Amino acid sequence: MQEDSEGFRYPVINSELCIHCGLCHKVCPAEHMPEASQDEKYAFGGYHNSLYVRKFSTSGGAFTAIAQEWAEQNPDYFLFGAASKGLAVFHYGIDNIRKLPVICKSKYSQSRIGDTFVQVRDALKSGKKVLFSGTPCQVAGLKAFLRNADTANLLLVEVICEGVPSPLYIRKLDDHIFKTYGSRIKKLDYRSKGQKCSPESFKWDFQRMSLELEDGRIFEKDRWFNPYWSIWLQHLMSRPSCYECPFTTTERQADITLGDLWGVHLYCPELYGNNGGASLIVCNTEKGRTLWQAAEKRFTGHALDFETALKYQGPMRKHIDVNPQREECMNDLADESMSYSEICEKWAKKPDAKLLFQKYVWGNRQKVFVWNLKNKK
Ligand SMILES: Cc1cc2nc3c(=O)[nH]c(=O)nc-3n(C[C@H](O)[C@H](O)[C@H](O)COP(=O)(O)OP(=O)(O)OC[C@H]3O[C@@H](n4cnc5c(N)ncnc54)[C@H](O)[C@@H]3O)c2cc1C
């Protein structure tokens, strides 16, 4: 895998070693899309009963509930997901549920698969029950890689995904931090819910990016003032393939699809859970549904109408559009003479008064609070 000038990695064939068997083409999901499930969908919304799990999950902790159930049902299990060390994000397998936090939480950068597909194949061959989680393209890649292997013992979990940003931005941020504070980023939580573990202080739809430096200092930045989110969500620095992603449809490759329960305050405010985070769980196969329904006991929530949930989930309906200024922005990011501050000044939008009012004065939390008051009467 070699990195291009935008920081994205691509497979490169070593022509001296290649025997022209064509297997790489046969297992490429971009060339041969694996079959999606035609089973009836089952959608569920809610949050994990453990406050601790919710705090250390991006949404409502559905991934933890599924992993816990998988480990409880299967004594000989393996769990794969995305872990991180410093700025690096990579797939990693664990065989002890106590290590689960390592592969929890969303890292908004493409994870390196490494040899985890081979590990999955070998674990299945040796009779282990394997749960693999990743983005929809990674799940499709694994399915294609496994070809005709017996996958009865495999559960596939994917996150709803609207793309991955170039790692160049975060690297520039790290250099900026180092120049300013003399210490590099040790831990990066893209969507921290806050430092305290109390429901009053949770900030799911108001997340902050939290940076822990090697020297122990912690910095947090509100979502609305964070240039990272502004630049990425203007679709100025996504991976080129994400602009034509074939997985952004209701046809899913995984047994279970997980996302944030966006729109919760509009169609099921009882699941808002004081802004502690709420999950949308979509079961695409009977296998996924059976597992999730067993995991539901760890959750507060209820079944949802799939079509209603879909309205609030753009990445399950369509891929992102290319921003016409993307190329210029990527050139700036790749330009070593352009500093982090110059990038932010040129490309990030500052929040306007309306947004600030919505987020800091009259936001979802307040709306749900009023809804609760009315419904208690
Ligand atoms: C790149 C990315 C984009 C996303 N975009 C959306 C979106 O547009 N809308 C939406 O509703 N939800 C999106 N999500 C999903 C959402 O952020 C949560 O991951 C999901 O709701 C599960 O949260 P949880 O509370 O159940 O568990 P968590 O414990 O937060 O679980 C996170 C899960 O994501 C996996 N994961 C984390 N980082 C990566 C990564 N870099 N690559 C592959 N897998 C990873 C973990 O292994 C784990 O399975 C995205 C996630 C990622 C990683």
Image (cartoon, rainbow, N blue to C red):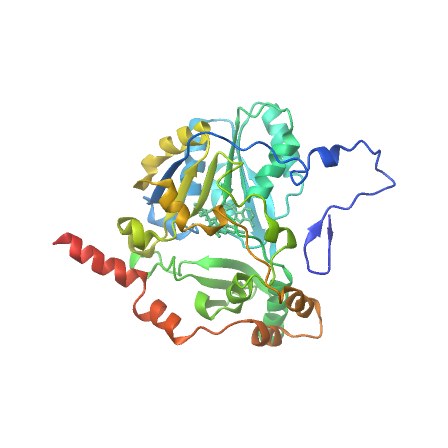
Q: Quadrant of residue 114?
A: top right
Image spot of residue 174 (x, y percent): 61, 66
Q: Quadrant of residue 21?
A: top right
Q: Which quarter of the image is occupied by the C terminus?
A: bottom left
- Could you tell me if residue 89 is visible in this image? no
Q: Residue at x 40, y 39 (%)?
A: 65
- Residue at the extreme left: 377
Image spot of residue 265 (x, y percent): 31, 55
- Residue at the extreme right: 16
Residues 58 and 377: in front is 377
102 horizontally vs 311: left or right? right
291 horizontally vs 96: left or right? left
Q: Quadrant of residue 91?
A: top right
144 vs 14: above or below: above
Image spot of residue 243 (x, y percent): 60, 53
- Could you tell me if residue 270 is visible in this image? yes
Q: Residue at x 64, y 51 (%)?
A: 241
Q: Count numbered badges in the picture.
A: 0
Residues 267 and 145: in front is 267
185 horizontally vs 291: left or right? right
Image spot of residue 299 (x, y percent): 33, 40
